[in-house]
Amino acid sequence: MTDKSTELSSPNRWWQLIAGVVCMVMIANLQYGWTLFVAPMSKAQGWAVSDIQFAFSIFIALETWLTPVEGWICDALGPKHGPKLVVAAGGILVAIGWILNSQAQTITALYIGAALTGAGGGAVYATCVGSAVKWFPDRRGLAVGLTAAGFGAGAALTVIPIRMVIAANGYQAAFFWFGLVQGAIVFALAWLLRQPSPGEVRGVTTLVNVIQSTQSLSPGKMLVSPIFWLLYVMFVLVSGSGLMATAQIALIAKDYNVADSVLFLGATTLTVTLVVDNVMNGLARPFFGWISDQIGREYTMAVAFGLGGIAYWLLGSAGTSPWTFMVCAGFIFLTWGEIFSLFPSTCTDTFGTKYATVNAAFLYTAKGTSAFLVPLANKIEILTGSWYQVLIITAIMNFVVVALALFVLKPLRARHIANSTMRLRAAE
């Protein structure tokens, strides 16, 4: 429930949210469409799949690890100019990165393209999420969830077109044209963006079941807090499991001999699965974000990640037919995408709003750390001869995070916020 005793001003915030969501849609298939390019690149260039997937790790690493710098630049340039300039630069880098991928004749060139794309995608992501937590203190989980949903579900719009372009003209043409168009749209929308000016969002309401700090900690103080590093470890574990599925889903479908089976209206199992996965990934973010506004962040984490652990186990043990593969994979994405609404919201609840863009960006770097688990999944599959062990490991990772959320994070956050409140009262 939400205390409605005060209202927030500026209906402009909804238009800002919409613009941010569209920007996120435009960068979605940088990550979630990647799996479509892996096999065609390996076949055309003769590169090992594990080497190609290292480019994906570079993309994820820079898309996340640079966000604290990009968030700091955005805040330093001010609420009026920061979002415009950072997102516009992101759009340019996104376009250049995928165009370079289309021309890459060496694995090194592919890595450079991945680095540029990661830097651009991170600039867009950090700015849009940072704006959402600032514009919507009363609906933080929902607003961040909707913003992140653009990134999670946006690729559903392009899965079929990308596959068609690859089939007709090769993966190089898909990289070139989608990179160019997506980058141009992000660049154009950037000039509509801004963050709230001081005092513009007034009368902050409180969420009854969500504990929120009344003080803001700077990034330096946050980085010495045990709570931050606990959140970081939890983020790495859940993100790593999801990225393994994101990058490998096409390969798993191929190894299960279901990828090209006709499933629905002439569409193959892989095509339908990718569309369903992206939709589920997107829905998870606002849905669990909204749930967390009602029952609290930690309880929502326990429910979502507990179901996620079951989902990975089901894909490994029962996902070998076309329909069960599609359903189990969709279940994984429904219970994974919410990390991108739950963790930024929890971070801002804990460490305050003043430095929210930079603080959330520091936590988001955990996704980059987790990206280096993706090639490890390939190594485990080669060593064991199946994906079953990989999926069991990812299930265990999710169950560990459930325990950490309930029995470690929840009491630590409650103590931290109680102490912050006491200090604030003593200062008064």
Image (spheres, rainbow, N blue to C red):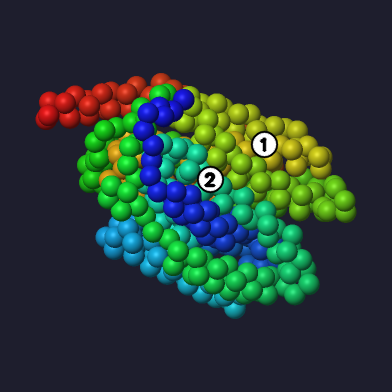
Q: Quadrant of residue 349?
A: top left
Q: Give the x, y percent position of residue 392.
A: 61, 33
**In what quadrant of the picture does the C terminus appear?**
top left
Judge the density around disc 2: few (<14), some (14-19), many (≥20) Cα neighbours within 10 Å. many
Amino acid under disc 1: Phe
- In the visual, does 366 lie left or right of 49? left
Q: Nearer the viewer, residue 56 or 141?
A: 141
- Report, in whole angstroms, how far the alpha carbon at label 2 lies from the one at label 1: 19 Å
Q: Which residue is mark 2?
A: 146
Q: Give the x, y percent position of residue 316.
A: 69, 36
Which of the two marks, 2 or 1, is nearer to us in this view?
Answer: 2
Q: Which residue is mark 1?
A: 331
Question: At numbered mark 2, what does the secondary structure look like: helix, strand or loop?
Answer: helix
For image coordinates 58% across by 74% down, the residue present is 180
Amino acid under disc 2: Leu
- In the visual, does 77 lie left or right of 323? left
Q: Give the x, y percent position of residue 267.
A: 83, 53
For image coordinates 44% across by 52% down, the residue present is 12
